[in-house]
Image (tube, rainbow, N blue to C red):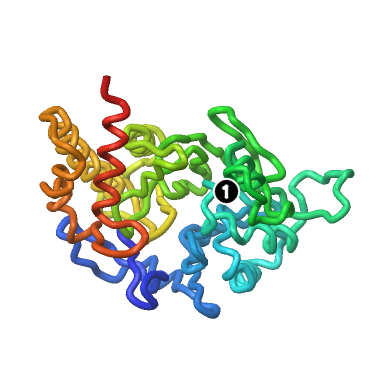
Amino acid sequence: MRWSATLYGGPLIALAIVLPAHHGAPSLLAQQHPSTTIGALETIQIRPNVYVVFGAGANVTVHVGDDGLILVDSGSSDTSKALLKAVTSISNRPIRLIINTGADADHVGGNDAIARAGVPLTPDPFTLEPQATILAHENVLRRMSAPTGRPSPFPPTAWPTETFTSQFKSLYVNDDAVQVIRQTGAHSDSDVMVLFRKADVVVTGDIIDLRHFPVIDRTRGGGIQRELDALNRLLKELIVPNLPNVLKPGGTLVVPGHGYVSDYGEVVEYRDMLTVITDIIRNMIEKGMTVDQVKAADPARGYRGRYGAGTGPWTTEMFVEAVYQSLKESTP
C-alpha cells in the first residue's frame, strides 16, 4: 500500500492502493478517512486513533486516547505554531508525551512550543512550569544540550526530560503498548523507532526516508551496516504483511521520517535497494577502487530515478560517499 503526495511537494493528499506495477486506484480507506489541511500542513487518519501530520519538517505521528496525545517527533521550530493548530484540530485532549526519533532539528525543533502546550505524562513536583514529557535516547539530550561543545540552539524546555539507553523503553498509554526501540548507529547515534502494538503502526524516524536514499550521517555516528540492520529488524520483528489475504486491507503501517505512509512491501523494496548498492560498493572497495572512482562508476544508477538527487541537501554522490566511507571503516 502506497499513500503518496500529489500537491505542495510533500504533504499527503489521498490514499491509493498500489499494485505490484505501482499503478494506483482509489481505496475505500481513502474515502472513509480523507485528509484535512490547516495552513500548509496536511493531516490524515491512518488508524481510528492514529494520525500523521505532513509538512511540519519531519512527519509527525499523533496517537490519541483517554490519557491524552502522544506525538512522535515535533517538526521544525518555524512550523510549531501550525503544528499545534493541526494537533488540536485532531483532539482537544492534552499533549502528554513527545517521543523524538533523533536529534535533527526537523524532528526536535518544535519540542519547546509543543511541550509547553501540554502536561507531563507523570507529574513532577520539582517542575515549576509543567510541560509534556519529552522522551528520547540519551544521545539526543547530549546533542541538544551541548552540541559539539557550543551553546545549544535549543532552549532547555526543548530538551528531553526523560532518556534511556536500554534496548527498549516500554510504556502503556492510551490503552496501547508503546515500545520505543533503540536503533542507534543507522542514520545517526540517536535513532529510535516507535511501535504502537495495538494500533499496529511503527514510526521509523530517518532510518527510512522515502524521498531519497537514506541519509547516513557519518558526522553523527551513522553507518551503512547499522542502517541495513535496522531495516532487517523492521522486516523480521516489527512489520507484519497482509498475508495470506493480500487483496484485503491489512498489515502493519509504517510512518517514515519523511515521505508517504507505507507498508511491508515498500520497506522490502527499500531494504533490497540499499543491499544491492552496498554490495556493489563493497565489491568495488575489494578491487581497490578509490572513493572518486566509485562515484564515477555510479553504483546507484539503477535507482537514481526513484531515490536519487543531483542537487539539494542529500545528493546521490553524498550517499555513495557515505556508504563507501562506512564500509572502508569496517574493512579489516
| Residue at x 55% of width, y 61% of height | 75
The residue beneath circle 1 is 100
Q: Position of residue 216 (x, y in %)?
A: 36, 44
Of 89 and 162, the residue lying toward us = 162
Identify the image quadrant of residue 291: top left
Q: Residue furthest top?
A: 332
Dot 1 crowding, Cα within 10 Å, few <14, some 14–19, many 20+: many
Task: Check the image and report above or below for 279 versus 267.
Answer: above
Locate the C terminus by quadrant. Answer: top left
x%, y% of residue 246?
Answer: 25, 49
Q: Residue at x 70, y 67 (%)?
A: 92
Q: Quadrant of the N terminus?
A: bottom left
Compared to residue 143, the image places residue 257 above or below, namely below
Residue appearing at x 69%, y 40% in the figure: 162
Is 30 in front, or is 219? 219
Quarter of the view holding residue 217: top left
Q: Residue at x 46, y 49 (%)?
A: 205
Q: Nearer the viewer, residue 142 or 251?
A: 142
40 versus 142 height, above or below:
below
In the current view of this chain or complex, which residue is farthest to the bottom? 39
Residue 77's spot in the image, x, y percent? Answer: 60, 65
